[in-house]
Amino acid sequence: MATTDIGKEEKKRVEIYDLEENLAIDLAKFTANLSDKFCKERGAFTVVVSGGSLIKSLRKLVESPYVDSIDWARWHFFWVDERVVPKNHDDSNYKLAYDSFLSKVPIPPGNVYAINESLSAEAAADDYETCLKHLVKTNILRVSESTGFPKFDLMLLGMGPDGHVASLFPGHGLCNESKKWVVSISDSPKPPSERITFTFPVINSSAHVALVVCGSGKAEAVQAALKKTGNVPPAGSVSAEDELVWFLDKPASSKL
Ligand SMILES: O=C(O)[C@H](O)[C@@H](O)[C@H](O)[C@H](O)COP(=O)(O)O
């Protein structure tokens, strides 16, 4: 593994792995350490995941030693974006996370915050934002003192080959949303078109963010996001209040 300093901000670092297997092992250690810290400090750990290949990269967490040592009862589990499809649909990010992660760990079902997919995308986004506001009131979710947006303990994000994160796509007006916490999109260039997504102010108010990116097809977007070359894609706007870590495999880092 190589660590590269790619920014002026001390809290941002890039980890590059020869093998995706080693990336997955380190991602599990990173997540387990934060879980331990937040469960002890505040009795809860708020974790957000994206869809896509990120979920596969979390596979080591559901194996020994982590599966037995993590305090799963204190986890609160969210999605940074979700497709507005039934929960048993193959496009559902809930189904993806459930099949390979949630079904293997004892997170209380009441701590798993899936969207209400019986609503329209717009209503589902409002409903999810209301749910987050309730969790702020009950002190499960913190609020950033500097931005006033919710401050998740850990956000685990993937990135598309065009440099999108969550359902925030290059050139889309939603990338500039500055007030809402959760918004709907009905013209997602990546199918399915109807989705809900957290906004940048929410993503960037997180305590810790991991951006997990593998494969040569993403090397150019990684380069543009990190080196700020050409048209900087949405991934280049991701930040965190405490720590942002890019987890890259060799092919994804090949243009750095
Ligand atoms: O639901 C989604 O579509 C996502 O949350 C999306 O932001 C995803 O994380 C990236 O498109 C990367 O996906 P891959 O890792 O599968 O390329």
Image (cartoon, grey):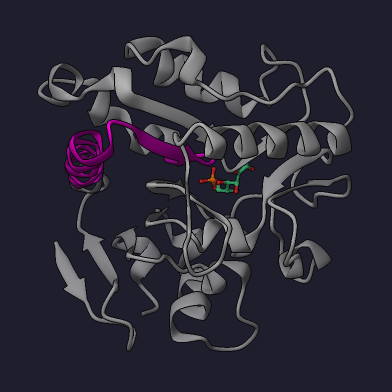
Nearest the eye: 136 or 122:
136
Q: Residue at x 41, y 12 (%)?
A: 108
Q: Residue at x 23, y 30 (%)?
A: 60
Nearest the eye: 20 or 197:
197
Quadrant of the image where one finds ligand 1: top right
Q: Is residue 68 above or below residue 164?
A: above
Magenta stretch bounds: 25-54
Left or right of 244? Residue 16 is left
From the top left corner, tell me how far across and down residue 138 is, in percent.
Answer: 50, 31
Left or right of 139? Residue 117 is right
From the top left corner, tell me how far across and down residue 197 is, in percent.
Answer: 69, 46
**The C terminus lies in which quarter of the figure?**
bottom left
Left or right of 112? Residue 91 is right
SS assignment for the magenta stretch, majority:
helix
Left or right of 17? Residue 202 is right
**Quadrant in the picture for residue 94:** top right
